Amino acid sequence: MKKIILDCDPGMDDSMAIVMAVKSPDLKLMAVTTVNGNYPIEVTCVNARKTLELLGRADIPVGKGLGKPLVRDVPKDPFTHGRDGQAENFLPDPIMPLDKKDAVDLIIDIVKANPGEVTLVSTAPMSNIALAMIKAPEIKEMIQEIVAISGAFGLNKYAFLNATGDTPQSEWNVYVDPEAADIVYNSGVKLTALGLDVATYFDVNFNDDDLKKLEESHKKEAAFLLQAIRFTNGRGFDAYCTVIDCMAVAYAIDASLVETMDAHVGIETKDGLTLGMTVIDRRHHHVWEDLPVVSVGCSADCGRFLQLLMELVLK
């Protein structure tokens, strides 16, 4: 069973990532850490606890993380997840308290207590993870792997067609805190970056049979997903938007779902047209060897991904 910490910014798709992580028999969710991203930190740390209580897992600690990027102001997300940040499911306010430790210390302490065993699953800006590395640089050698919804690499038309950042070719998590992403990408920790090339694929959709199964289920999490799909479709977006962050959890469960390649990648931290871009150097000659090498998602088995998601939601 793989030990993971899920660092997230719920968000309807982060909420569904929590559902997958909790319900997978292959994962042990050690903690959920929250950060500013899709919504302010006061919303994301509430929504994480709402989701865990929905699943009857108030025993999993939730750490409240950074309320802003490392050095920047908080940008406004052009995409909305609804008035409650959860596709207007309006779950009950949580009863469970936040952990006494903040998100950064929770990450540090769990990694140190389980050296070489913890995978960080990042579905949000990397502010918490970067600060943990700054505060306790020794943990970098103790983290097994980082799996992140991060970047847009231009490997297919979806990478930039579905760009989620507020510059033409950026992904939201990197765009919000590019300095944090730069720290993590350059940390030396094994990093698998699942960019918009694989996480926003139009083939990640739900057919009529899927919707019927969700409607007929008595599971609260099935009702949550169904409402999220209806909310998203009602705003003119495809249903893949409800489960983007689930791809990272799915990869942690079964890495064969995504084909990856190693590549030199740099993060653009300068303001302007390219802020937040993940620039991949694929040249045969004159490659910038000083850029960090990370594993980049090239293609995903969308059918198997959706099958896994549905099985866990309905389980």
Image (cartoon, grey):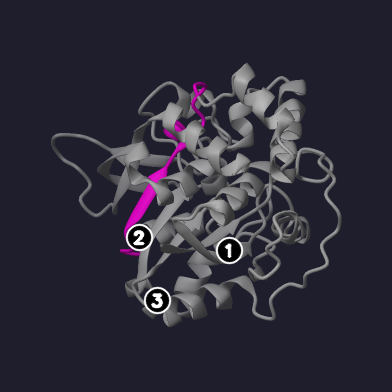
Specify which label sits upstream in the sequence, 1 or 3.
Answer: 1
Question: Circle 1 sits on which residue?
Answer: 70
Report the span colored magenta. 186-203
Res 207 → quadrant? top right
Q: Which amino acid does label 1 sit on?
A: Leu
Question: Would you place residue 249 above or below residue 133 in this image?
Answer: above
Residue 109 part of the magenta segment: no
Rate crowding at label 1 as few (under 14), some (14 to 19) or many (20 or more) other CA atoms within 10 Å: some
Q: Residue at x 77, y 56 (%)?
A: 43
Q: Distance between the Cα atoms at labels 2 and 1? A: 16 Å
Question: Circle 2 sits on which residue?
Answer: 186
Question: Circle 3 sits on which residue?
Answer: 139
Q: Which amino acid does label 3 sit on?
A: Ile
Question: Would you place residue 2 above or below residue 197 in this image?
Answer: below
Res 300 → quadrant? top left
Q: Position of residue 221 (x, y in %)?
A: 70, 44
Q: Where is residue 26 in the image (x, y as percent from the top left)?
A: 44, 56
- The N terminus appears in which quarter of the rendering? bottom left
Q: Is mark 2 on a helix, strand or loop?
A: loop
Q: Is mark 3 on a helix, strand or loop?
A: helix
Q: Residue at x 43, y 56 (%)?
A: 182
Q: Which amino acid does label 2 sit on?
A: Asn
Q: Which of 160 and 82 is in front in this view?
A: 82
Could you tell me if the residues under marks 2 and 3 are in contact, i.e. CB atoms within 8 Å?
Answer: no
- Depth check, mark 2 against mark 3: the one in front is 3
111 lies left or right of 287: right
243 lies left or right of 56: left
Q: Where is residue 66 in the image (x, y as percent from the top left)?
A: 65, 66
Specify which label sits upstream in the sequence, 2 or 3.
Answer: 3
- The C terminus appears in which quarter of the rendering? top right
